[in-house]
Image (cartoon, grey):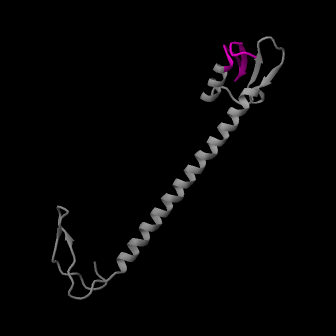
Amino acid sequence: MHAGMKLKVRHAGGELEVPSQKELTHLWQLGFIHEDDLVLREGSDTWTKAKDLPWMRGTIATDKRENKMFWFVVAFMVVSLGFVLFARGKTRLIADRVVSPPGSTQAKSTPQGRAQPGTPAPPAGQK
């Protein structure tokens, strides 16, 4: 089959004429043509599923690999977010347990958000 051969595609209850194999592959990559859509090559009487066309097999494998990679990245991001939230919670618990020694000073923030050095630390157990 050469690149200029016309194809017919049965898709979603209708028929679509595609001018070339290249155009059919492009429509496949855009998601308009699906694996089970039927394709009729010019000069043939046999309808073939798009997934069974020789030049589409490599495209299907690539799509599946990309799909697996997408879900791997999503899972990695979810696990990373969970770890960050877990770590933030732990650091707050640890910070709440830390008690300043008697007589030490602690920086306090002002309404403008600036720290005032030299403010006495609160007694143990108070914030």
Q: Which residues are the magenta region?
A: 1-21
Q: Position of residue 10 (x, y in %)?
A: 73, 20
Q: Is residue 13 visible?
A: no
Name the residue: 20% across, 87% down.
Answer: 103
Residue extending farthest to the top is 43
Name the foreground residue: 122 vs 9: 9
Horizontal side, residue 48 vs residue 100: left or right: right
The C terminus appears in which quarter of the rendering?
bottom left
Q: Position of residue 107 (x, y in %)?
A: 21, 73
User: Which of the pair 2/122 is nearer the observer?
Assistant: 2
Q: Is residue 52 above or below residue 40?
A: below
* Side of 56 relative to 67 (left or right): right
Name of the residue lying farthest toward the right: 45
Image-based side of 1 in relation to 111, left or right: right
Q: Could you tell me which residue is drawn at 45 percent across and 67 percent down?
A: 87
Q: x and y percent of residue 46 in the render?
A: 84, 18
For residue 19, which quarter of the picture?
Answer: top right
Q: Which x, y percent locates residue 23?
A: 64, 19
Question: Does 53 sit above or below residue 20?
Answer: below
Residue at image location 65% in from the left, 20% down from the top? 22
Relative to 79, residue 108 above or below: below
Quadrant (top left/top right/bottom left/bottom right) for the N terminus = top right
